[in-house]
């Protein structure tokens, strides 16, 4: 009787592992990139000596901090930021290596091989201030997440 219980229990665990595999483990250890803080648009003084203000004509600065608050590293991460205002320059500060940064009028795309647990990414968007809403879309091996900031 006891051997039968152990045999069926082992068979059940084996079938569940075979059907779901790594997904069971990853369900409990997913990464989760989230906005930790966002600072409101900072109006840049007209008489500022900043090169960005003088050469590009930026009149505002948006500061965004993203952080992996999940239980594991985020791999093959792509972060897309869409702003209503015109993005003139983007400065990224992170402890992890940023593979590439591409930006045009109102869109910024960051590509990273990984983002470790509890590691922040600071993003400075120099822009011409129009409307505030910013959409952030984070895609990694675990899936995607969209955030709307107002």
Image (cartoon, grey):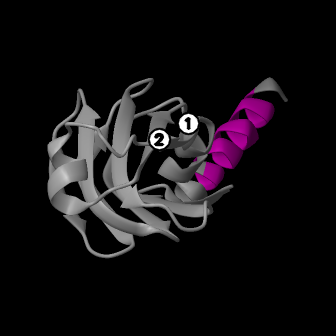
Disc 2 target residue: 64
Q: Is residue 48 visible?
A: yes
Question: What label sits on residue 120 in the rendered view?
Answer: none
Magenta region: 3-16
Q: Are marks 2 and 1 in contact (CB under 8 Å)?
A: yes
Identify the image quadrant of the N terminus: top right
Q: Main secondary structure of the magenta part?
A: helix
For the residue pair 145 and 37, the one nearer the viewer reads as 37
Q: Secondary structure at mark 1?
A: strand
Q: Is residue 30 visible?
A: no
Q: Residues within 10 Å of mark 2 (few under 14, many from 20)?
A: some
Disc 1 target residue: 39
Is 55 on the left-hand or right-hand side of 62? Answer: left
* Above-or-below relation of 10 to 129: above
Q: Quadrant of residue 57?
A: bottom left
Which residue corresponds to the image point at 21% horizontal and 66% vertical from the top-left? 102
Q: Is residue 11 magenta?
A: yes
- Residue 86 position, x and y percent, is 39, 70
Which residue corresponds to the image point at 73% horizontal and 37% vertical from the top-left? 9
Identify the image quadrant of the C terminus: bottom right
- Residue 112 position, x and y percent, is 24, 50
Q: Secondary structure at mark 2?
A: strand
- Which residue is the extreme one toward the bottom? 105
The residues tagged by marks 2 and 1 sit, at their Cα atoms, a distance apart of 6 Å
For the residue pair 30 and 134, the one nearer the viewer reads as 134
Is 134 on the left-hand or right-hand side of 66? Answer: right
Q: Is residue 49 magenta?
A: no
Which residue corresponds to the image point at 56% horizontal and 38% vertical from the top-left? 38
* Above-or-below relation of 18 to 83: above
Looking at the image, tell me whether mark 2 or mark 1 is earlier in sequence order.
Answer: 1
Instruction: Single out the mark in the foreground, 2 or 1.
Output: 1
């Amino acid at each position: 009787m006891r051997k039968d219980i152990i045999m069926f229990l082992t068979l059940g665990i084996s079938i569940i592992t075979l059907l779901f595999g790594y997904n069971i483990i990853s369900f409990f250890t997913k990464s989760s990139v989230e906005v930790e803080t966002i600072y409101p648009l900072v109006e840049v003084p007209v008489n500022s000596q900043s090169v960005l203000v003088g050469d590009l004509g930026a009149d505002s600065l948006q500061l965004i901090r993203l952080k992996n608050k999940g239980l594991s590293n985020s791999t093959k991460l792509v972060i897309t930021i869409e702003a209503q205002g015109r993005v003139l320059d983007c400065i990224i500060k992170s402890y992890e290596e940023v593979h590439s940064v591409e930006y045009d009028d109102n869109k910024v795309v960051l590509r990273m091989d990984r983002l470790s647990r509890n590691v922040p990414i600071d993003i400075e968007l120099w822009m011409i201030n129009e409307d505030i809403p910013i959409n952030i879309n984070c895609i990694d091996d675990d899936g995607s997440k969209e955030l709307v900031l107002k």
